[in-house]
Image: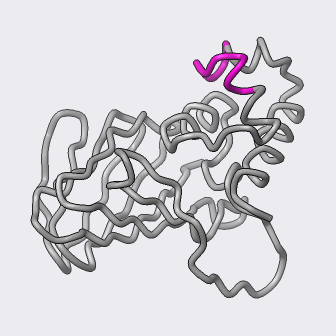
Amino acid sequence: MDVTSLVAKSVRQAREAKKLTLDGAAAATGVSRSMLAQIEKGEVNPTISVLWKIANGYKVSFTSLVEDRQPGVEVLHQGEPLAEDEGRYLNYPLFPFQDQTRFETYRIVIQPEGALKAQPHLKGSSEYITVFAGQVEITVDKESFALSQGDSIRFPCDVPHGYRNPGTEPAELSMLIYYGD
């Protein structure tokens, strides 16, 4: 299933599980009714920021909106990324949230000068990031941290935060988001 169709199905199922009308969903997420309808019909491929608004509004994990859940052993092959910042910030969803693990993982590639300002995630959640290549600047609630290859950071992500590549080479990161109790 392609990403647009998967997102359409998952967003519709999440809304219906919450017993929300499109108007109620728009109020909960801050995403317009017409945009939600287009997403659910598979007419548009939403940005990462829009998907985070939907996930936070529905109080579900981000990956529950972008991953097809299959039981048992999973081998992941690189799929289509979700793009932001005119393609300079690429998010490759990996392992989706599961109730027993309470986390989800991503591979992030940020081109030079690429950036993403992230919305706060669910209360009590934390991010764990390791830089495998390049440089990245992580901002957490107005404080900035410079990381290079081999560096890692953990921070509460229920506050405004962001990622930026100040270097001249692509930055490659591993991101784990843990959802507390």
The magenta segment is: 27-36
Compared to residue 166, the image places residue 45 above or below, namely above
**Nearer-the-camera pick, 165 or 139:** 165
- Give the residue drawn at x 63%, y 38%: 55
**For residue 19: magenta?**
no
Compared to residue 151, the image places residue 24 above or below, namely above
Residue 162 locus on image (x, y percent): 28, 44
**Nearer-the-camera pick, 166 or 157:** 166
**Nearer-the-camera pick, 111 or 138:** 111
Examine the image and state in which quarter residue 68 appears: bottom right
Relative side of 10 to 136, left or right: right
Residue 141 locus on image (x, y percent): 24, 34
**For residue 29: magenta?**
yes
Relative side of 16 to 179, left or right: right
Give the number of callouts.
Answer: 0
- Give the residue drawn at x 27%, y 47%: 115
